[in-house]
Image (cartoon, rainbow, N blue to C red):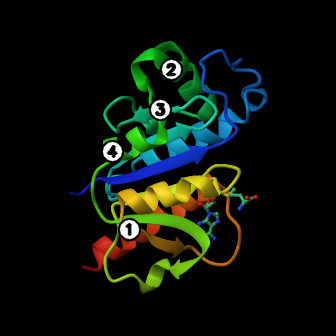
Amino acid sequence: MNVYVFAVVTPRAVPSPSYSLKNLEGHGRIDVIFRCALAALRRPSNVPSSEFYAYFTKGEGYLHLTPDQYDYNLEDEISLAHKIKEKWHDLWFNCSFDHFLRRLPQTEAAVLTEKGTNIGQLKTIPHLFFLGAQQDIPVELLPKIKARYPKPIEVSLGNKPLLASQAIMLTRMYIQNKSSTQ
Ligand SMILES: C[S@@+](CC[C@H](N)C(=O)[O-])C[C@H]1O[C@@H](n2cnc3c(N)ncnc32)[C@H](O)[C@@H]1O
């Protein structure tokens, strides 16, 4: 599998397309989710492609974006928000967190956290990365991830706290460097 999957968990963003493009922040900071999507899906030619999921705990459901849906290199967060607003019902899936986990690929998984093993020390690159948006992944969901992925690795990008979109970009840069030296 050469696709890398980023699964962001947001406890704050409001799971509906009723946001105003002039005030994405007022929708539980859904702007953070669109920035994360762009960080995961913009594709300079030499970076392996990614898929993006955002699980909204407020509404029990997720958005799923794939590399072929839009030309993400041409989008900014407002134009992407506009496109997703129009197609929300095609991109949104209602389900519990347990069902969400079952829809993700069964592969080597990592939870991004400042306290984990430094990414540079990994022997193999996981293909699925979980991370929080604005807040860390709610602690009650971590055992569910561990039940589905018996050995999820906790992976750190350094001891400085990063924005979720920065964490995705740094992870992709790491994947790119690691793939080009193998
Ligand atoms: C904005 S941070 C979460 C906010 C912060 N920890 C808090 O609760 O106030 C978003 C997510 O990015 C990931 N992250 C941030 N800094 C990181 C780092 N240095 N190493 C690995 N992952 C990181 C974590 O998954 C984190 O939940």
* Ligand 1 within 8 Å of the CB at mark 1: no
Please name the residue that numbered disc 4 is placed on: 102
Quadrant holding the C terminus: bottom left
Judged from this view, the residue extending furthest toward the left is: 1
How far apart, in angstroms, are the residues tagged by discs 3 and 2?
13 Å
Q: What's under tag 1, amino acid-wise?
A: Ile
Alpha carbon separation for disc pair 4 and 1: 24 Å
Rendered residue at 34%/39% (across/down): 67
Numbered circles on residues, count: 4
3D distance between C-alphas at marks 3 and 1: 24 Å
Circle nearer the viewer, 3 or 4: 4
Q: Which of 22 and 148 is in front in this view?
A: 148
SS at badge 3? strand
Q: Mark 1 points at which residue?
A: 175
- Among numbered discs 4 and 1, the one appearing first in the sequence: 4
Q: Could you tell whether 3 is left or right of 162 in the image?
A: left
Horizontally, is 131 left or right of 99 in the view? right
Closer to the observer: label 4 or label 1? 4
Residue 75 lies, in percent from the top left, at: 52, 32
Q: How crowded is mark 3: few (under 14 residues within 10 Å), some or many (20 or more)?
A: many
Local crowd at mark 2 within 10 Å, few (<14), some, or many (≥20)?
Answer: few
The residue singled out by tag 3 in the image is 63
Residue 22 percent coordinates (x, y) = 75, 21
Secondary structure under tag 1 reads helix
- Counting residues from the start of the chain, the first of labels 2 and 4 encountered is 2
Tell me the quarter of the image containing the N terminus: bottom left
- The kind of residue tagged 3 is Leu
Q: Which residue lies under the disc numbered 2? A: 83
User: How far apart are labels 2 and 4 at the CA level?
Assistant: 27 Å
Q: Is residue 43 above or below residue 12?
A: below
